[in-house]
Amino acid sequence: MARVKPSPTGAALALATKLRAAGRDIISLATGEPDFDTPQAVKDAAIAAITAGATKYTPIDGSAELKLAIQSKFRRENNLEYSLSQIIVSSGAKQSLYNLCLALLDPGDEAIIPAPYWVSYPDMVTLSDATPVVIGTGIEQGFRITADALAAAITAKTRLLFLNSPSNPTGASYSAAELATLGAVLEKHPQIVVASDEIYEHITWAKEPFISFARACPALFDRTVTVNGASKAYAMTGWRIGYAAGPAALIAAMTTIQSQSTSNPCSISQKAAVAALQGDQAVVAQMTAAYRERHDFLVEALNSIPGFECRAGEGTFYAFPRVTGAMQKLGMRSDIEFAEYLVNTANVAVVAGSAFGAPGYLRLSFACSLPTLKEAVRRLKRAVAA
């Protein structure tokens, strides 16, 4: 336990909650949680499941009904074909990723993680007794790794590559051509499995339509684990339903691990997820349109703050500005100190970029209303001007 730390995003949320309880008027831009309610049809399905008595254990790797819905989703939206034995349902996409690390990694193995990264990737690898190998990127590279950088990071010990597109925390997305160049490198290294984290698949406004890594690189289909879930697209964070699809032997190992940890995901949440995947998808488009409007406002507003430099993203609900200019102006030694200054001075909670492997940046979530964002920007401008 001394090797890992609690989630920095969870810590930021806990601090904002504590300060609010103390009477502070805190605006939290720290948490990646949609402010929309779960669609009514999904809630109705859960209520019906409770009434019908669907409150018992299901198979450890998810109910047949939900796995069929996931299979259909992959076929319909991603042009990917998986058998039911290649699919596992977990208590959130995070558990699917953690199961994968435990099932795949041995002591001495290495896992490549492009930075900025989602905060949990390195600690999942560390808890699996393997070594995280970080490839750093910045705003100049569009927060995307190149084929050359990937090739340089690979060793005989490399066993896993994490890819998250669209990305938390940057909103950056890989095109089909960019994924293909990475795939060409990976084809030369048959020991490497790709963990393609596609949880923000539907929250995208890139010029090209979203493409799954396994579809962009079909030669790597048998070495790709595609991870997704209901939390972000359907505003179902608290329902805790994630899923993964990949090689049958690896999915079976992940199921064994899950059998000795949590067993099956919540039976009622699984019924709700079936309704989400099979229901009218118009609500997803409506929420994404709102995120796009907030994104456009926030990126422009952040770029108007002296010392802030923000790249427009292609998806998710995060902005990731570089703030080294503002830090220097205020005499701040680190982004962590700057984030603390903002919550104490501006009453705006954000997460320091260091938590994502990117010192000198901040992550701001725009999964909140436009008026809230406008007030947050007003406070930030005032704090930086001070």
Image: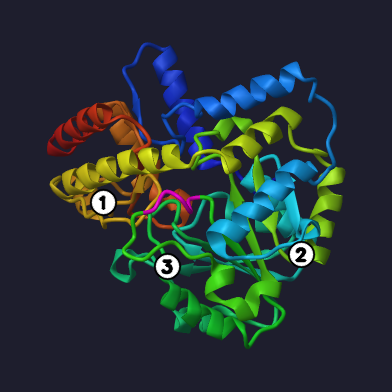
Instruction: Assign the N terminus to one quadrant of the image.
Output: top right
Characterize the local packing of mark 3: few (<14), some (14-19) or many (20 or more) Cα atoms within 10 angstroms: many
Q: Would residue 42 appear left or right of 249 to someone viewing this image?
A: left
| Residue in front for this viewpoint, 92 or 350 | 92
Q: How far apart are labels 3 and 2 at the CA level?
A: 25 Å
Residue bearing the label numbered 1: 323
Amino acid at circle 1: Val
Residue bearing the label numbered 3: 174
Image quadrant assignment for residue 324? bottom left
Q: Residue at x 50, y 39 (%)?
A: 280
Q: Would residue 182 appear left or right of 2 to someone viewing this image?
A: left
Q: Earlier in the sequence, mark 2 or mark 1?
A: 2
Q: Please tell me whether mark 1 sits on a helix, a strand or a loop.
A: loop
Q: How far apart are labels 1 and 3 at the CA level?
A: 24 Å
| Magenta region includes residue 32 | no
Q: What stretch is highlighted in magenta?
A: 200-204
Q: Nearer the viewer, mark 1 or mark 3?
A: 3
